[in-house]
Image: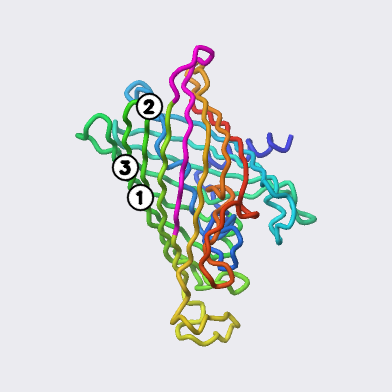
Amino acid sequence: MRLGVAFVACVGLLTSAYAYAGGHDKGGASASGAPAGPGGGSTNVRGDTVDDENERNVADKPWEVGGIFETHRLFIQNDLQGYGNNKLLNYLHLFARWDFSKHDAIELRGYLFERLLVDPGETGFRLEDTVLHYSHRWKGLPEDWGIRTYANITAPTSFYSQLMSLYTSPRIGIEGSYRHGPWSVALLGYAETFITKYRQMEGGNPNPWLHLGSYLDVSYRLPLLESLSEPLTVGAMVTVHRTWLRDAGGGGAQPSALGVSIDPQYDGQPVQGTYGGEVYVRYRLPNWSGLHSDVTVAAAQGDPTLGYTSSLHDGIAHTYLFWRQSSQVFLALSARY
């Protein structure tokens, strides 16, 4: 029943002309070492990476609709230091896409969280920022190579974007890919800026103003097994992010009148860093009446849904594997028509 309500809500979000009320529940940077998300800037690029979307004949069917349902569970279920609402969560992503040429497409994306541990009076459901996405695939390249550029603009429909006083967060990115036999490699980089009304979010923390991210994904499509009718793929992904924060104190190394502390070792806010990665297995289900679907199982330290782990802990840069607040296993089922 609750997931049915979530599905109807997201369909309404995608089909309405105005789909906004909040901001990205995605990962930014946390100086405390907590997972950088949900909350802290829009870093969701799972929908931006290489997939088999162009297997279909664009000339025959220039549009596509689809969705991804994910369920996440942290490996460690206690000692989460205030992040208990991430122990188990569900996530729904719906999209509508139109290829207005063989190499160009626009896409409208909507997202919805369902958290199973919430404060009294809350439903557990929250929207993420709605995204309008444009992508261009470059032609004239060797057969096994691909280059794609894209641009996003968001509408602040998430709770976190409301706290940020976010107007929008434009993003530009470029992705290069190479496929050789069963092997596939993709490298993606992007830059995102945050246009906010105030320098600080509610509660006094500084707002981000620039976010840079990079992803490296390597996968191998296993030879077809007699018992399987569709390809089985195994892969691994690593990601690194940097976030620049606004000087909430208005400049200088002294605490501001609003009580926001600035480290006296820095002239302004230090650059924040996050990192993450995952290993996954994906099985593409048999096509049925034009419906394409696949199922993925992954073990990850952070991901675009839950957010990523900060490399700053108590003011010192550290990188930890299996950080308790972001190490997880998740199941994702995608379908598109």
Viewer can see residue 110 = yes
Label 2 near label 3: C-beta < 8 Å?
Answer: no
Q: Is residue 61 left or right of residue 11?
A: left
In reply to whether residue 231 is colored magenta, the answer given is yes
Q: Is residue 121 left or right of residue 264?
A: right
Residue span colored magenta: 222-241
- Of tags 1 and 2, which is closer to the observer? 2
In reply to whether residue 93 is colored magenta, the answer given is no
Whichever of callouts 1 and 2 sits on the residue coming sooner in the sequence is 1
Please say if 18 is above or below 315. Answer: above
Residue beneath the point at 40% across and 58% down: 212
Residue beneath the point at 53% across and 71% down: 316
Mark 2 neighbour density, 10 Å: few (under 14) some (14–19) many (20 or more): few
Please say if 35 is above or below 263. Answer: above
- Of tags 3 and 2, which is closer to the observer? 2
Please say if 210 is above or below 204. Answer: above
Residue 164: image quadrant is bottom right
- Of tags 3 and 1, which is closer to the observer? 3
The residue that mark 3 highlights is 176
The residue that mark 2 highlights is 182
Calculate the distance from the C-alpha at mark 3 to the C-alpha at mark 1. 10 Å
Q: Which mark is residue 173?
A: 1
Q: Residue furthest top?
A: 226
| x then y, percent, for residue 317 | 51, 67
Residue 31: image quadrant is bottom right
Tell me the amino acid under the disc marked 2. Pro
Label 1 near label 3: C-beta < 8 Å?
Answer: no
Query: Element under label 3?
Result: strand
Please say if 244 is above or below 293. Answer: below
